[in-house]
Image: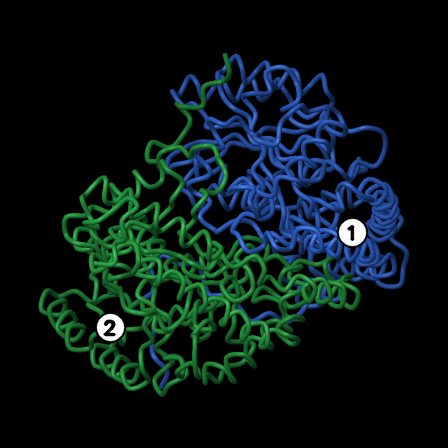
Chain colours: A blue, B green
Amino acid sequence: MPFDYTPFLRADLPAPAARFGGFPKYNFVGGHNDADAVPVADLVAAAAAALSREGRTLATYGLNSGPQGYLALREGIVRHLGSKAGMACAADDVLVTSGSLQALDLINAVFIQPGDTAIIEEGCYGGAMTRLKKLGASYVGAPLDGDGIRMDTLSNILDDLKARGTTPKFVYTIPTVQNPTGSVMPVERRVELLRLAEAHGIPIVEDDCYADLIWEGERPTAIKGLPGGDRVVYCGSFSKSIAPALRVGYIVAEWSVLSRMLPLKTDGGTGALEQMVLAEYLAGTFDSHVAELRGTLKTKCAAMMEAVNREFGSAAEFSAPKGGIFLWVTLPDAVDTARLFKAAGAEGVAINPGGEWSADAAAGAHKLRLCFAHPTVEAIHEGVARLAEICHREFGVPVRSGNVGRDG
Amino acid sequence: MPFDYTPFLRADLPAPAARFGGFPKYNFVGGHNDADAVPVADLVAAAAAALSREGRTLATYGLNSGPQGYLALREGIVRHLGSKAGMACAADDVLVTSGSLQALDLINAVFIQPGDTAIIEEGCYGGAMTRLKKLGASYVGAPLDGDGIRMDTLSNILDDLKARGTTPKFVYTIPTVQNPTGSVMPVERRVELLRLAEAHGIPIVEDDCYADLIWEGERPTAIKGLPGGDRVVYCGSFSKSIAPALRVGYIVAEWSVLSRMLPLKTDGGTGALEQMVLAEYLAGTFDSHVAELRGTLKTKCAAMMEAVNREFGSAAEFSAPKGGIFLWVTLPDAVDTARLFKAAGAEGVAINPGGEWSADAAAGAHKLRLCFAHPTVEAIHEGVARLAEICHREFGVPVRSGNVGRDG
């Protein structure tokens, strides 16, 4: 009989993981990207160039650049944010992290203690919410419209919290290609958000991990790049613009914040090889790659919207995303997407049930998130058709099903 | 005036970090390695081969291999442990981590809660102790001799704990190239350790991160590879055998443990590029590289021992390490190495004060750890001479100083 570890395990662990069984056939979840869009040849060249030139520095933790990360990468991030996000910062303001998930962990680690309150967006990255919950914090979801957080309702939320004697630790926002709605907050509203935060004396956490993937035109100036941006802790990532399996993100913040995060980053540094390759690639063909990737993603987004329209008809409501990798779909109230998630999962169609992506889980219970970057256009069409069949079987929605068109 | 984050920060944060000011001139701390020994050309080739063949899989989190890490790397680790550590395991028993530091974090995360007790070695990796303290656990240091933990004293410790009603969560050991003493626990003692652990019904955590760097002969069979090894949670690393800036380590454990760790590894996976390159390199010239690296390190170790003998004479006592990258030196009781650390640091000589590497900080207060892998042989000689001068100035030890030989 093998050794029984049960009495030695913490009492409060989450349920055990199941064995990985491979990805589902129709994989509409997660930040996966288009396999054809991975710039393999340029990454090979970047690895060869960076390693040949500086490979000996791998002998030291942090590549002689110290705990904030590889200096050439931080300098590249500074140039990138200067030209693309309208943000002036210095390499000393940047902390390279092991993906933007570690960035969120470090942000929470310095700010959040049990009993704290954070303001998030009513539709919100699920991982941000599970992290806050795990730390014993509660959150209030600020209502969204097509331009991101509605400032009138945010103002009311802040006033209400104040009346109850609660100062939120921060407002967490994904202003550029909001997750899951795909909206982009216009600059005027960003200015207003800063004004509201100033009036209430609170910081802002700006998660810009999708900002490179805006379909058209320039990114609006980052909130951190606007006057008063010193109250903003900013994070970004290359997971979405190059490849999610590369785990490199970053935080841009005042030294008064970074200096408190550094003692908590006890990982021996973020992977140096990935940092070196990204620095080289960022200084090389990154911009033209992103331009091409945007086109690929826009095409897949169009396929997803077309498939949802065709298969679900008027039963599905959504706004066209302004960029990114996901579509946020509202189904009739009768549809419980948590149940749909299970039924569809059993038949090889993976979706994000809306409750897991909503500050108010009940309010999101008939919504779902469909990621379109990874599946082929063909898989999008097949998978959404399959999903509509399952949804019809389970909930009678969409009304017409089977071989009959559902354009109603 | 910039935004004041102070009221928003957690009350219990460690002191803020200072700005990184570069490495000290004589850098005798940390797991840094020999810069000339980084196998740059072979890493370039490994990156090109792995990326060209499988770069498209970077588009998915976890490279289609699931949350336990890149399958080819896990298979390579299985082969490596089978041939070098006498351990039979399968790819499904391996969890790839972001360095062995994340391995320690995950091990602690599943086992340790506030108030727990762990048994460690009396001389112990400092980061293992700070992690346990941070989690609210206490530890008992088991005395060491030239063969690692003394089983008679460990038996007494376990009996004493039992008499007080305390079951330790695990015995944490670095049996092969012990940190900081550089000893190697013989197989017979490993068997005895397992027997003791069985008698007391407790698990063992085996940290084998230096095991590739044993000077001569074969590694003893890993504790996990011996009968009864199912009670062992094993971790290893490539930081010490290839390059510390590459952040890839691993855990080998029963599924009853791994399945509880996986939900806590919320980092989106360990960097895939590093995993791919290491898998390729491990299947290639890794073994011959390690053989050469051992020779380099042995030469530097000899230089360090020679320098300490020449500069400190009989004031310094140490045992010749059987491998690795550090020398554990005992100075006369009058020397406070915490004070020496400060005085030497101010003059460009970095050392690990023994108190930080000792379960009983007071007992280690006149010891120090000197890492020799990174500095050149010339820097070793110069830096140790400088250290002896400073030590003489501060403590009158070693007795003769300045331009006079200290061979006494």
User: Which residue occupies 50% across, 20% down?
Assistant: A158
What's the amino acid at mark 2?
A: Ile
Q: Tell me where residue A163 sits by quadrant.
A: top left
The N terminus of chain A appears in which quarter of the rendering?
Answer: bottom left
Position of residue A288 in the picture relative to residue B180 (left or right): right
Q: Which chain is mark 2 on?
A: B
- The reply to whether residue A408 is visible in this rendering is no
Q: Nearer the viewer, mark 1 or mark 2?
A: 2
Q: Residues within 10 Å of mark 2 (few under 14, many from 20)?
A: many
Residue flagged by tag 1: what amino acid is it? Phe
Q: Secondary structure at mark 2?
A: strand
Work out which residue is located at the far front of the displayed protein and give it.
Answer: B404
Where residue A111 appears, as percent x and y from the top left, is 44, 33
Judging by the rendered image, the residue that carries numbered circle 1 is A372
**How many numbered discs?**
2
Residue identified by numbered label 2: B149
Q: State whether residue B158 is above or below residue A340.
A: below
Same chain shared by disc 1 and disc 2: no
